[in-house]
Amino acid sequence: MIMETAYMDIVPGKELEFEAAIEEAKGIVSQAKGFQVLHLHRGVERPSTYLVAIGWDTVEDHMEGFRNSDLFVQWRGLLGPFFAAPPAVEHWNLFE
Amino acid sequence: MIMETAYMDIVPGKELEFEAAIEEAKGIVSQAKGFQVLHLHRGVERPSTYLVAIGWDTVEDHMEGFRNSDLFVQWRGLLGPFFAAPPAVEHWNLFE
């Protein structure tokens, strides 16, 4: 599995609203081809930062399929207003 | 669960040796109080960087219990020679 890590810095004070929005957004991304799982983490040392880890079949399912879809427009429309900075995104091969 | 994220930059060319060493090191950290799970990821965009995600019952189980134990000395002894830089470590509350 490919794991996408997205670090999302949220406008301070908007954290709980963001948490509700990402629950809704999960229902959107989970419809994308190749989506496997989404894990939401909130920073202990950086409590306005969330680590969103999304499992995909392939990098292309994320970067080409999802990013160029209407689902991504909906996803970004829901979450974008909460971002204090553009998310930092990388991909990882999960060994185990 | 608390998730520790440790980004480990490995000396180029030593990646496969590191992968074998962390298998052995997993047998060590898994003996620590509060250890739950270890996930190993290798970077797609940064193939000499590994994301080691370790689940703990509490931050203290990692930072006080494990870090001050003989198990940590063994862990660091196995992995330290492969590090091109000190690992960057943070903690996260896992929501789901």
Image (cartoon, coloured by chain):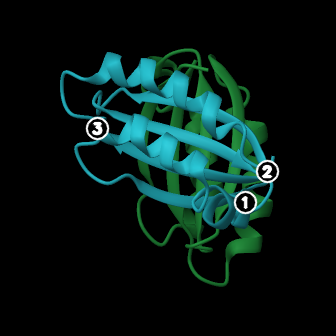
Chain colours: A cyan, B green
Q: What's the mark number on residue B64?
A: none
User: Tag 3 or tag 2, which sits nearer the N-term?
Assistant: 2
What residue did someone put label 2 on? Answer: A34
Q: Is residue B18 left or right of residue B27?
A: left
Q: Which residue is mark 3?
A: A81
Q: Chain of mark 3?
A: A
Type of amino acid at the residue the image marks with label 3: Pro
Where residue B78 sits, quadrant-wise, is bottom right
Q: Residue at x 50, y 41 (%)?
A: A75
Query: Circle 2 — which element?
Result: loop
Residue in the picture at 74% in, 59% down: B21
**Contact between labelled residues 1 and 2, with CB atoms less than 8 Å apart:** yes
Residue A50 against residue A73 in the figure, above or below: above
The image shows residue A3 at horizontal and vertical percentages of 67, 51
Q: Position of residue A63 (x, y in %)?
A: 61, 64
Of the two numbered discs 3 and 1 on the same chain, state the one appearing first in sequence: 1
Question: Are discs 2 and 3 located on one and the same chain?
Answer: yes
What distance separates the C-alpha of mark 2 from that of mark 1?
Answer: 6 Å
Residue B68 appears in the rendering: no
Q: Is residue A66 above or below residue A26?
A: below
Q: Chain of mark 2?
A: A
Q: Chain of mark 1?
A: A
Amino acid type, residue under disc 2 in the picture? Gly
Q: Residues within 10 Å of mark 1 (few under 14, many from 20)?
A: some
**Nearer the camera: disc 2 or disc 3:** 3
Above or below for B21 versus B68:
below
Mark 1 and mark 3 in contact (Cβ < 8 Å)? no
Residue A39: image quadrant is top right
Helix, strand or loop status at disc 3: helix
- Which sits in the foreground, A14 or B57? A14
Q: Is residue B71 left or right of residue A77?
A: right
- Which residue type carries mark 1? Asp
